[in-house]
Amino acid sequence: MAFKREQEATLKPGDSVEMRSPFGHTYRFTHLGVSQFEALNRIVSAATVEVSKDGKPAGIMTTEKRQHVDSFKRPTFEPSTEVGIRSNLQEDIYIVYAGSVEGTEQAVYRFNINPLVWWVWFGGGVLMLGGLITLWPGGGPVTRPRRAQSGYEVTLVGAGSRE
């Protein structure tokens, strides 16, 4: 988390914001617009962002704000957010759509660049695998050859026979 980069921005369609990653890459996030539509049991506001890395197109990411509704279109829960995520071995990009400004196409975003997240998950998997190997049931009890202490062995009197 020490190398995490975070920035908030309010963007109109066509506006951009730039961020520099811990690895020296420059990301440009360009707000394309906000669309609203109805799904089965929710009303969705989706914001679309074009991403470029070091001046080269890196794709389009979408993040959503969802309001679940009942059959009369009344809100049933607090709105939920679907985060836009792009992940690779080096860094993860998270885009969070916080909402629109007064119902316009102007959107409020939070952009996060988190380095080496994949490696944290990989390390957790290695740790779990090592734990399973350690706890795996083995053969029978381990027997050790009997050894005399201090170089000699003592036999107790009367322990050998009962008459």
Image (tube, helix red, strand yellow):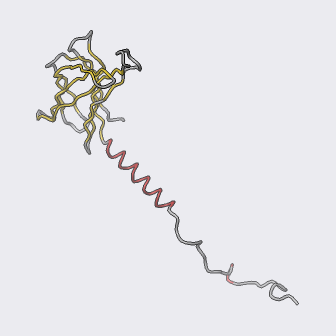
Single out the residue that lies furthest toward the top. 102
- Location of residue 20 with respect to 156 vertically, above or below: above
Q: Nearer the viewer, residue 123 or 95?
A: 95
Report x, y in % for residue 4: 32, 33
Image quarter (top left, top right, bottom left or bottom right) of the N terminus: top left
The answer to which quarter of the image holds residue 46 is top left
Report x, y in % for residue 95: 27, 28
Q: Nearer the viewer, residue 28 or 96?
A: 96
* Residue drawn at x 44%, y 57% as measured from the top left: 130
Image quarter (top left, top right, bottom left or bottom right) of the C terminus: bottom right
The answer to which quarter of the image holds residue 161 is bottom right
Residue 33 visible somewhere in the drawing = yes
Single out the residue that lies furthest toward the front. 71
Q: Nearer the viewer, residue 118 or 13?
A: 13
Report x, y in % for residue 149: 69, 78
Report x, y in % for residue 96: 29, 26
Viewed as shown, does residue 127 lie left or right of 51? right
Single out the residue that lies furthest toward the right. 163
* Residue drawn at x 25%, y 19% as measured from the top left: 9
- Location of residue 53 with respect to 64 vertically, above or below: below
* Residue drawn at x 35%, y 49% as measured from the top left: 122
Viewed as shown, does residue 83 lie left or right of 20? right
* Residue drawn at x 35%, y 35% as measured from the top left: 2
The answer to which quarter of the image holds residue 57 is top left
Residue 7 visible somewhere in the drawing = no
Viewed as shown, does residue 150 lie left or right of 69? right
Q: How many marks?
A: 0
